[in-house]
């Protein structure tokens, strides 16, 4: 009888499925196919009446100490922790993942083959339907670039939004707010990335700081976070107030705010004006915010595109 350990099974299975990101359950099913002798021996345990019960147990074993031991034994074993479920994969160049920007490009073709631009309408749908925000897409290609080459570096957020706080208020209260100093809206700004890794997390985060700190709420959005990245994000978010939103493209309404942004009580209008002067999309967004401030009117045809 073969004496393959569960750690060996994890390493060998992920090595033979390079380019795939597998859940613990998917790994467990592959164990049944790849290691029939070991699985037959385990099935002798009366606790497992059928394959499904065995798969559930194997998946639990994968998610425990055995994965940590597999990582210690083989540096190519990696996990993506967020969003759930945890995904397991083989990284051919683990040193590059940790130390170089090559990893940025590696993940561009992964996860349902979506590119960053494909995520914008998905995010807008979630923000509108789940969070009640009214969104605008900001296309940096339409900017004037009046500052010269590199002058608009990290200037533009990907998505901006308005949250109408007074939408359900009585008209009398709305009128008081509009003629007083209280705010009837909050403004949001979002920078979108495919995946946050140890190689790109600081670069992506400070891009969001640069282009989204003007708003009441600024967020960095990603479809996934690699193993070991979340503690760095917790530290950075605590220092700079930017939040983290995990966008689940497979189950949109399973998306979540991982780290809430710190609300800024006042808009940085100087920074907002800098974007307005360069970009017509942002100009239109600010115009629509102004229209809502003055009239309370939301024009459906101009929002959530």
Image: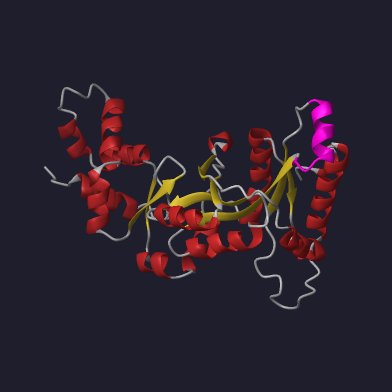
**In which quadrant of the rendered image does the C terminus lie?**
top right
Q: Is 229 placed left or right of 53 in the picture?
A: right
- Say which quarter of the image contains residue 147: bottom right
How many numbered marks, from 0 up?
Answer: 0
Q: Looking at the image, which is closer to me, 265 or 158?
A: 265
Q: Splitting the image into 4 quarters, where does residue 280 fall?
A: bottom right
User: Whole-percent x and y of residue 290?
Assistant: 84, 47
Q: Is residue 291 above or below residue 49?
A: below
Which scheme is used to colour this image of the protein?
A: secondary structure
Question: Which residue lies at the image location 81% right of the left edge and 40% below the top edge?
Answer: 180
Instruction: Name the residue: 63% across, 34% down.
Output: 130
| Residue under the point 65% across and 40% down | 127
The picture places residue 294, in percent across and down from the top left corner, at 87, 42
Residues rendered magenta in the picture: 170-183
Whether residue 232 sits left or right of residue 149 in the image: it is: left
Compare residues 185 and 31 and report the one nearer the observer: 185
């Amino acid at each position: 009888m073969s004496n393959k350990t569960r750690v060996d099974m994890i390493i060998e299975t992920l090595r033979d499925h390079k380019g795939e990101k597998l859940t613990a359950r998917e790994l467990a099913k592959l164990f049944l196919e790849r290691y029939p002798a070991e699985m037959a021996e385990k099935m002798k345990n009366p606790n497992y009446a059928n394959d499904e019960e065995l798969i559930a147990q194997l998946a639990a074993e994968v998610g425990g100490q055995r994965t940590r031991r597999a990582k210690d034994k083989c540096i190519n074993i990696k996990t993506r922790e967020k969003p759930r479920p945890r995904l397991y994969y083989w990284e051919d160049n683990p040193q590059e993942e940790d130390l170089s920007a090559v990893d940025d490009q590696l993940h561009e073709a992964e996860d349902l083959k979506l590119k960053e631009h494909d995520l914008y309408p998905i995010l807008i749908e979630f923000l509108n339907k789940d969070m009640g925000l009214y969104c605008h897409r900001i296309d940096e290609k339409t900017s004037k670039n009046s500052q010269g080459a590199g002058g608009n570096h990290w200037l533009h957020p990907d998505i901006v939004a308005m949250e109408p706080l007074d939408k359900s208020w009585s008209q009398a209260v709305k009128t008081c707010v509009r003629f007083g100093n209280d705010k009837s809206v909050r403004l949001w700004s979002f920078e979108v990335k495919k995946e946050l890794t140890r190689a790109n997390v600081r670069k992506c985060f400070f891009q969001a700081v640069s282009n989204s700190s003007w708003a009441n709420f600024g967020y960095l959005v990603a479809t996934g976070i690699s193993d070991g990245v979340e503690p760095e994000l917790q530290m950075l978010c605590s220092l700079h107030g930017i939040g983290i939103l995990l966008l689940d493209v497979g189950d949109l309404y399973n998306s979540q705010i991982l780290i809430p942004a710190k609300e800024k009580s006042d808009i940085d209008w100087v920074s907002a004006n800098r974007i307005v002067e360069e970009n017509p999309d942002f100009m239109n967004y600010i115009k629509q915010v102004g229209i809502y401030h003055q009239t309370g009117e939301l024009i459906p045809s101009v929002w959530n595109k």
